[in-house]
Image (cartoon, rainbow, N blue to C red):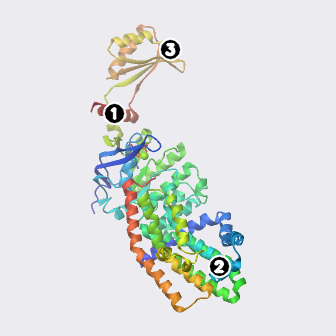
């Protein structure tokens, strides 16, 4: 059997009508365009990060794909099944995690909660209990002593683990995870990330993973989609996205003496100078922006020697995904202002 | 067959859920056992201050404490259904469970039919523990039979009430947004119309007709006739057939309203 893309979205549009309250009784309706034609796809076995700032439309996208929200227009499918017209088929194929901090019954233990949801999913009792036990172990809840404690006593990290366990209950081929590490401490976040990676590489699951944390997206995802204000603004591997940035790099020069005269001379070369005289660990730092760092490093050294400034070290900063994020999201803002 | 198997496992899951909430809170257990007595005591104290118990017995045809304990028990069992069905969507939404419930392959209707069963079963069992002593005190061995009849009838009341209660409950959310206040409005209305404390044969005509539309009202009427001793075959079977027929009649409405409710949720986006 040839399987197509695990997740496909084509030109999804979603508007919300909200009320602006301007007084106790006065209000007027306002239309929020949450998605303005979002198209994306996730291949089989691929982990794709959907990255965007607050209000970008990440949750809206995940909800539509999870059959929990009807789009105004556009099309989305999971392994070829339409999320609107074949929702019941789609529901068999997806595991979802929409929040870390709630979504379970407080007076049931983690284990009881999973058994409850497994029953809703129509899982057979014996198999369900085995699966639940396995998952509690897998996500580390047993290790933390949380498997048989009431959910309302859970820490955030334990809640997140339980939520991931529920997403994995039916062993679905597709995972839709909305900010699964939001607010978690590093060990819990790392656990969730490594489980997601493992699910993709060992079990071939396809994952759509939203986040606004570049660092983690770079760790987890094979490919990144940047979304801003309901529009996809860029897409590619983290490396490719970085290469799309204008190729200006920052050179940091650490010196023992104040680099004032060096800065003046460097500026004369036509290079942009930033953050003069910032002191770090007893050293002065000078930041120079250059299009081709390799070609100017020699010049900078020569000037420094002639001015009697001892350079301790020089560093060329590589762009981070965060730079990419800021570049594309702010460009989006500028584009909108022009219209 | 598949559906039945699914349904029983669903009911089992609901039982585990509801009983966890129930038994992990001791005060609730005590309340369930004491409730028919507390409300009876309250009403007796209140009743004696306005009229004599003899007058009540003459007018209604049965001793006030027995009538009231049975009535409170019935009310408690029936209201367990209404409350469960009406509160659950709000509770699930606030605890963030709803998206996972709605995105499960289990249909909304099947789920909602299973929801009241655990607490109802519980209130039947605990209520019986409260009911048996009084009826035996007042009526001896006959009291035992009467209690069993009352319990059987309360089960029937509940079963035939599920379709209407679901349609009303979810219907309120479809039309009135998340207005849970509607529940506090609907609850006392149902309370009066079901005729638990105020026998239907004493109601005015418009009220009587309105209450005829509620399936449990007919069961309650039978219970009261049994207490009074009016147990002619016709007087008992006609209301019971009527109650069952109404229950079936409201079922398509329940299906429709559930579908509308789900659609509304999907339009707005299920809250997480
Ligand atoms: N039910 C709703 N009613 C009205 N507006 C909504 C609703 N849900 C989302 N929105 C709006 O749609 C836009 C996109 O929201 P969405 O939740 O998808 O963003 P997000 O990328 O998940 O943001 P965050 O990082 O804050 O979670 C926002 O402007 C939000 O205010
Ligand atoms: Mg979000």
Q: Please report, as a chain letter, where disc 3 is located.
A: A
The secondary structure type at the circle numbered 1 is helix
For the residue with label 2, is its CB less than 8 Å from the closest atom of ligand 1?
A: no
Which residue: 49% across, 60% down? B182
Q: Cβ–Cβ below 8 Å for labels 3 and 1? A: no
For the residue with label 3, is its CB less than 8 Å from the closest atom of ligand 1?
A: no
Q: Residue A307 at what x, y percent from top left?
A: 43, 7
How far apart marks 3 and 2 lie (CA) works out to 97 Å
Residue B181 seen by the camera: yes
Q: Which residue is mark 1?
A: A333
Q: Which residue is mark 2?
A: B67
Which label lies toward us, 3 or 1? 1
Q: Which mark is residue A256?
A: 3
Report the number of discs: 3
Q: Nearer the viewer, residue B226 or A326?
A: B226
The secondary structure type at the circle numbered 2 is helix
- Relative placement, left or right, of A310 versus A289 is right
Callout 2 crowding tier (Cα within 10 Å): few <14, some 14–19, many ≥20: many
Callout 3 crowding tier (Cα within 10 Å): few <14, some 14–19, many ≥20: some
Which residue: 64% across, 83% down? B61
Q: Residue A312 at what x, y percent from top left?
A: 48, 18
Q: Please identify the quadrant where the N terminus of chain B is shown.
A: bottom left
Q: Please report, as a chain letter, where disc 2 is located.
A: B
* Upstream in sequence: badge 3 or badge 1: 3
Q: Nearer the viewer, residue B102 or A178?
A: B102
Q: Please report, as a chain letter, where disc 1 is located.
A: A
* Residues at marks 3 and 2 on the same chain: no
Q: Residue A141 at what x, y percent from top left?
A: 56, 55
Outermost residue toward the top? A307
Rendered position, B70 above or below B169 = below
How far apart marks 3 and 1 lie (CA) works out to 41 Å
Residue B129 seen by the camera: no
């Amino acid at each position: 059997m040839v399987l197509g893309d695990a997740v496909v979205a084509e030109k999804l549009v979603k508007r919300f009508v909200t009320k602006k309250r301007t007084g106790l009784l006065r209000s007027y309706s306002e239309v929020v365009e949450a998605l303005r034609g979002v198209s994306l796809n996730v291949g089989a076995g691929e982990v794709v990060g959907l990255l965007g700032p607050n209000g970008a439309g990440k949750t809206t996208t995940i909800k539509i794909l999870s059959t929990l929200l009807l789009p105004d227009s556009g099309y989305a499918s999971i392994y070829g099944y339409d999320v609107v017209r074949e929702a019941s088929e789609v529901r068999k194929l997806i595991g979802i995690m929409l929040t870390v901090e709630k979504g379970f019954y407080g007076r049931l233990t983690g284990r009881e909660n999973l058994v409850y949801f497994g029953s809703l999913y129509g899982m057979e009792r014996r198999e369900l209990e085995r699966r639940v036990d396995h998952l509690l172990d897998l996500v580390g809840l047993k290790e933390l002593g949380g498997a048989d404690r009431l959910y309302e006593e859970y820490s955030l990290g334990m809640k997140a683990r339980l939520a991931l366990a529920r997403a994995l209950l039916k062993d679905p081929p597709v995972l839709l995870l909305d900010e699964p590490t939001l607010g978690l401490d590093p060990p819990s976040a790392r656990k969730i990330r490594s489980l997601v990676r493992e699910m993709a590489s060992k079990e071939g699951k396809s994952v759509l993973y939203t986040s606004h944390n570049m660092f983690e997206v770079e760790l987890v995802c094979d490919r990144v989609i940047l979304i801003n204000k309901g529009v996809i603004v860029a897409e590619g591997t983290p490396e490719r996205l970085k290469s799309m940035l204008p190729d200006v790099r920052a050179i940091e020069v650490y010196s023992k003496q104040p680099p004032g005269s060096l800065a003046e001379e460097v500026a004369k070369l036509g290079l942009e100078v930033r953050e003069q005289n910032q002191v770090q660990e007893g050293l002065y730092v000078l930041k120079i922006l250059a299009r081709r760092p390799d070609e100017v490093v020699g010049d900078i050294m020569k000037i420094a020697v002639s001015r009697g400034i001892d350079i301790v070290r020089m560093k060329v900063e590589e762009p981070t995904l965060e730079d990419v994020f800021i570049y594309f999201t702010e460009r989006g803002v500028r584009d909108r202002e022009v219209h | 067959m598949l559906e039945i198997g699914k349904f029983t496992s669903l009911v089992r899951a609901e039982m585990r859920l509801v009983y966890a909430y129930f038994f992990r809170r001791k005060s609730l257990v005590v309340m369930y056992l004491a409730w028919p007595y507390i409300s009876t005591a309250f009403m007796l104290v209140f009743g004696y201050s306005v009229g004599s118990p003899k007058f009540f017995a003459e007018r209604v045809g049965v001793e006030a404490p027995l009538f009231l304990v049975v009535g409170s028990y019935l009310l408690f069992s029936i209201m367990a259904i209404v409350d469960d069905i009406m509160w659950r969507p709000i509770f699930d939404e606030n605890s963030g469970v709803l998206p996972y419930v709605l995105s499960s392959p289990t249909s909304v209707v099947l789920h909602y039919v299973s929801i009241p069963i655990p607490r109802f079963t519980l209130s039947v069992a605990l209520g019986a523990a409260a009911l048996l002593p009084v009826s035996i005190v007042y009526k001896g061995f006959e009291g035992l039979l009467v209690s069993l009849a009352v319990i059987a009838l309360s089960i029937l009341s509940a079963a035939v009430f599920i379709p209407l209660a679901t349609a009303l409950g979810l219907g309120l959310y479809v039309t009135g947004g998340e207005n849970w206040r509607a529940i506090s409005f609907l609850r006392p209305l149902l309370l009066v119309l079901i005729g638990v404390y105020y026998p239907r044969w004493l109601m005015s005509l418009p009220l009587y007709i309105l209450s005829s539309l509620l399936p449990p009202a007919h069961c309650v009427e039978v219970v009261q006739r049994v207490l009074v001793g009016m147990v002619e075959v016709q007087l008992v079977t006609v209301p019971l057939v009527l109650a069952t027929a109404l229950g079936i009649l409201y079922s398509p409405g329940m299906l429709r309203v559930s579908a509308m409710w789900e659609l509304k949720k999907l339009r707005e986006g299920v809250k997480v």
